[in-house]
Image (cartoon, rainbow, N blue to C red):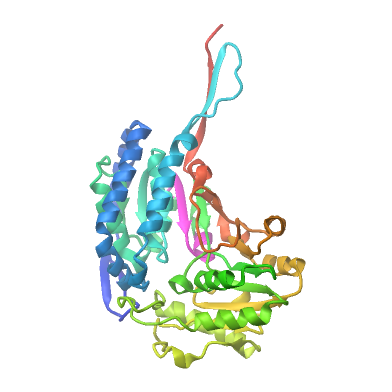
């Protein structure tokens, strides 16, 4: 029997090892989920909402254990306190949205008829969650799926094996029907078979483009619905009228928080020529103040990447860019913990970059950002659109009209002004091009987890 193993990027130790679920175990879980979903779909929404708030309480109770556990699994420093604050914001927002999002749609009155479109549960929702924000990315679908009356099967990433068990423990304690939510340890092959067997009704996958294509291939011909959030190469544009210090501070954080391992993190920045030189200096100075080290230390502001292979990929992007003429601004001497062959990787800022370099075109997903000079809004828009991805983009300016005009010209799922690297649960989380398909969060997120059912009732004849 194969095992899934989580190896810590902190020290190379084995954090967890779990056997892959057998075919019989998967079949039993699906049968139980199908039965539980029928029961759950009849539970009033008010009760479902109360259980999701109880789930939040249970997650809060685990947080002191979760934070260091998460640091050992994927490297985020404990000083940032885990994901509880954002988790609470999202759960509460989704609970509040659910009444309106799940209410029947009633068309204009027609005498003698009662007409409506109900939102009914999809059935069983398979959530395939990534390691970079393992609680948030999973909850983004789990919570609205349960609110909408679905059953949920969670397959979490190998790098964050214990997160699925934390969800299981919390949801087991709130009184859900037995088997309604189930965490299963699955490898790629078993996951593929689960999707292609049409045993689930909706799949939500967050991860790489290659992973998304694998999910689509597995689902081919099944007609099950898919939600695919596949990352980005998110750009920022700093106009000359930006609040300079604020833009520098926010963009440094947007580029390097979580060691740059964020699908909506800042990976490339275009700066107007009038402020380019001073922006580059200030950005590099602030970046150099990070402290790379053991994430269990409260002095550490930048932990290791989640695995050595991820750090190696980022080093390759940097190395190629430098070989093509890019200039690194951060002195390695300031980061003695950075060592080749480990997951510990210093932050790096590159100038002299262009779009022939992978670091400006492919998702690096690590602590590196390239800065380019532009002479106009139009040049910035062209460069921001020159990407196979389209998740978020941001413009830094004091002119809201200009920000909206620029946003209208950018192919992206979310357009920010004076903000980045943030998910607003009231807005649709979506993307274009290789970023994927579908929408999460907001009212639209509930629509993806339900199906419309029309009622056409003749009440007079």
Circle count: 0
Task: Report if residue 194 is visible in the image.
Answer: no
Q: Percent position (x, y) of residue 157?
A: 38, 64
- Quarter of the rendering occupied by the N terminus: bottom left
Quadrant the C terminus occupies: top right
Residue located at (41% from left, 57% from top): 86
Span of residues in magenta: 197-214
Q: Is residue 359 left or right of residue 82?
A: right
**Residue 208, percent from left and from top:** 50, 65
Return the x and y of residue 389 as percentages of the image width and height.
Answer: 61, 64
Res 244 → quadrant: bottom right
Given the current orientation, which residue lies at the most extreme left position? Answer: 173
Residue 335, placed above or below residue 437: below
x and y, in percent, of residue 458 in the image: 54, 13
> Is 109 colored magenta in this rendering?
no
Camera-nearest residue between 455 and 59: 59
């Amino acid at each position: 029997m194969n095992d899934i193993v989580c190896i810590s990027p902190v020290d190379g130790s084995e954090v967890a090892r779990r056997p892959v679920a057998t075919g019989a175990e998967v079949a039993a879980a699906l049968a139980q989920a199908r039965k539980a979903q029928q029961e759950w779909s009849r539970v009033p929404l008010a009760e479902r909402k109360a259980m999701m708030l109880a789930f939040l309480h249970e997650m809060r109770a685990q947080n002191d254990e979760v934070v260091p556990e998460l640091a050992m699994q994927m490297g985020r420093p404990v000083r940032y306190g885990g994901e509880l604050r954002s988790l609470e914001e999202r759960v509460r927002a989704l609970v509040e949205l659910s009444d309106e999002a799940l209410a029947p749609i009633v068309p204009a009155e027609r005498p003698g008829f009662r007409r409506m479109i109900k939102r009914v549960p999809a059935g069983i929702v398979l959530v395939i969650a990534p390691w970079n924000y393992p609680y948030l990315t999973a909850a983004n679908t789990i919570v609205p799926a349960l609110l909408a009356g679905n059953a949920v099967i969670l397959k979490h990433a190998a790098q964050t094996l214990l997160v699925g068990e934390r969800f299981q423990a919390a949801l087991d304690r709130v009184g859900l029907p037995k088997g309604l939510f189930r965490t299963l340890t699955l490898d790629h092959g078993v996951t593929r078979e689960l999707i292609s067997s049409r045993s689930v009704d909706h799949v939500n996958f967050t991860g790489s483009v290659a992973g998304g294509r694998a999910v689509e291939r597995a689902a081919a011909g099944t007609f099950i619905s898919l939600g695919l959030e596949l990352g980005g190469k998110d750009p920022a544009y700093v106009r000359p009228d930006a609040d300079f210090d604020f833009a520098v501070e926010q963009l440094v954080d947007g580029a390097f928080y979580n060691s740059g391992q964020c699908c909506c993190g800042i990976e490339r920045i275009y700066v107007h020529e009038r402020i380019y030189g001073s922006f580059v200096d200030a950005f590099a100075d602030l970046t150099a103040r990070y402290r790379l080290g053991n994430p269990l230390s409260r002095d550490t502001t930048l932990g290791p990447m989640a695995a050595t292979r991820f750090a190696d990929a980022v080093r390759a992007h940097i190395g190629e860019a430098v070989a093509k003429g890019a200039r690194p601004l951060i002195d390695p001497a300031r980061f003695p913990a950075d060592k080749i062959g480990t997951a510990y990787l210093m932050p790096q800022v590159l100038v002299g970059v262009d779009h022939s370099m992978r670091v400006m075109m492919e998702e690096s997903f690590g602590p590196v950002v390239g800065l380019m000079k532009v002479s106009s809004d139009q040049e910035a828009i062209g460069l921001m659109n020159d990407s196979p991805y389209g998740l978020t983009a941001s413009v830094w300016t004091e002119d809201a009209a200009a920000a909206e005009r620029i946003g209208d010209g950018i192919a992206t799922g979310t357009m920010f002004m004076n903000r980045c690297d943030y998910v607003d649960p009231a807005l649709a989380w979506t993307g274009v091009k290789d970023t994927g398909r579908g929408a999460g969060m907001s009212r639209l997120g509930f629509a993806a987890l339900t199906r419309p059912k029309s009622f056409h009732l003749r009440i007079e004849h």
